[in-house]
Image (cartoon, rainbow, N blue to C red):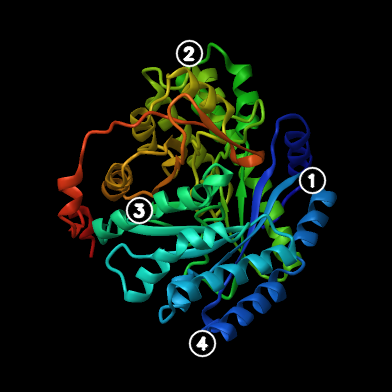
Amino acid sequence: MNFDFTEVLETIMMSEVEHFDIRTVTMGINLRDCSDRNINVVTQKIYEKIVQYAGNHVKNAEAIETTYGIRIANKRVAVTPVSFIGDSFTTEEYVKIAESLDKAALEIGIDYIGGYSALVQKGMTPGEENFIKSIPLALSTTKKVCSSVNIGSTKAGINIDAVKMMAQVIKDTAYITRDNQSIGCAKLVVFCNAVEDNPFIAGAFHGITEGNATLNVGVSGPGVVLEALKNYRGSSIQDIAEVIKKTAFKITRAGELIGRKVAEKDGVEFGIVDISLAPTPAEGDSIADILKEIGLEDVGAPGTTAALAMLNDSVKKGGLMASSSVGGLSGAFIPVSEDQGMIAAAEKGHLTIEKLEAMTAVCSVGLDMVAIPGDTPVNTIAGIIADEAAIGLINEKTTACRLIPAYGLGVGESVDYGGLLGKAPIMPVKMLSSDVFFNRGGKIPAPVRSLTN
C-alpha cells in the first residue's frame, strides 16, 4: 500500500495538535513449537523465541517514532494461548511459564505481554482447568503478563461452569494482589467471541490460525475526533457522522503507515490495523468528551447509547474505507478508569454499571476497567460476566469484562493505578442473588443464529 506525502503531514499535525498517537504496536509470536513434556525445556524455549523475534521490537518502534514524528504509546507482544502448549502441566508449572513470559518481557523492554490465555467456550480439559486455577498466582508474581479467558461464543454458547470459575479467579486475584489495590484484576479479562488478532491488552493473544510472527497495530484518536467535531456545532447528526467517518479514515491511514513500517523493521508480516478509539486519562483524549460534544449533558444521559452507536458505526465505516487490513476489535472503547470523562461521570453517579452494559451492546468490547466493591459475591460477579457475554452471544460481537472487586474498598472509594490504567471509582452493584441460576451449572446453548452452515 502506498502513502503520499500529504498523508504523512496530516499524521504529524494530528500528533502535535490533537492528541493522536499509535496506541500499540503488538508483535504476535507463535509458541506452539515450544511444547515439550519437560517444563524447564518449555520455559527456556519460550524465553529464547520471544527474545529472538522481539528483541529489537522496542528499538525499531522508537526509530519509526523519530522518523515520522508520531508517538507510539505502547510496544507489546502477544503469544499463542499458553493453555494450548501446556495442557499436560500442573498449576505450579503454568506459573513457571508466566514467569518465563515476564522475564522475556523485561529483557526486551516491552510494556506488556499478552497470551496467558485459554479458550474454553465449549468445554475444558483438565490442563485448562489447571491453567485457570494458576491465573491469580501468575498475575501476582509477574509485572508485565496479562491474562484472558474466552468463556463463550455465538457458535458454542456460554460455558457457565467456566464463568463461575472465572468469577472465583477474579476474586482470588483481587485478594492475592490486595497490597497493590487488587491490580492483578486490571491485567485479566473474560471474553465472549474473543478475536485472534487483537493488539490491545489485556486481551491480546496470537491466534492459532495466525502465522509464525505478525505485527498488529492499534490506533487511538479520541482527541482528533473531538477537535474535528468542535468545528461542527449546530450541524445535523448526519453531518456529525460524516465528520467522524472522514476523521477515522485519516486515523486508520496513519495507523497502517506506522504499523507497516514497524513490521518491516521487525522483519515480520504486517497483520491488521485495529481502528478503535482508545481513550487515556489525559484531558482531551476521552470518548465521554466526544459524546458530550455531540450533545449530551454527560455520559449516562438519555441518548447516550444512541450517540455511542452512531460514533462506533462511523468509526468502522471510515476505517474500512481506509484499509483492507482492518481487524481486531475496531470501534470505540469505554474503559471507565482510562477515560477522565467516564471517571467523572461515574463519580457523579451519572454512569452506572447497568447503563454501561447497555452501551457495550453498541461499542467495542464491554465492561472494561470497572471497579466494584471488594465484598461483591462470586455469583454476582459471575452474573455480570454472563450478562455481558450474552450481549456478545446474541449480537455476534466481542464483549468482555475486566472487573476489579477492589479488596477492602467500597462505594465512594476508588483505586488509582496512575499512568494508562488510571483511576477507577468503586461503582455500586446490585446484590440480588443469582445463586440458584449459577449453581445449576452447564451451558447456555448457542443461539439459532449460530446455525449458519
Residue behind mark 3: 168
Q: Position of residue 47 (x, y in %)?
A: 65, 75
Q: CA distance from mark 3 to mark 1?
A: 53 Å
Q: Position of residue 431 (x, y in %)?
A: 27, 33
Residue occupying image coordinates x 39% and y 37%: 360
Q: Residues within 10 Å of mark 3 (few under 14, many from 20)?
A: some
Residue 238 drawn above or below residue 439? above
Query: In the rendered view, does 306 fall on the left or right side of 254?
Result: left
Query: In the rendered view, does 159 fall on the left or right side of 257?
Result: left
Numbered mark located on residue 5 in the image: 1
Residue behind mark 4: 36
Element type at mark 1: helix
Q: CA distance from mark 4 to mark 1?
A: 50 Å
Q: What's the amino acid at mark 2?
A: Glu
Query: In the rendered view, does 20 fall on the left or right side of 407?
Result: right
Residue extending furthest bottom?
Answer: 37
Label 4–label 1 contact, CB within 8 A = no
Q: Earlier in the sequence, mark 4 or mark 3?
A: 4
Q: Earlier in the sequence, mark 2 or mark 4?
A: 4
Residue occupying image coordinates x 32% and y 74%: 125
Badge nearest the viewer, 4 or 1 = 4
Q: Earlier in the sequence, mark 3 or mark 1?
A: 1
Badge nearest the viewer, 4 or 3 = 3
> In the rendered image, which quarter contains the C terminus?
bottom left
Q: CA distance from mark 2 to mark 3?
A: 38 Å
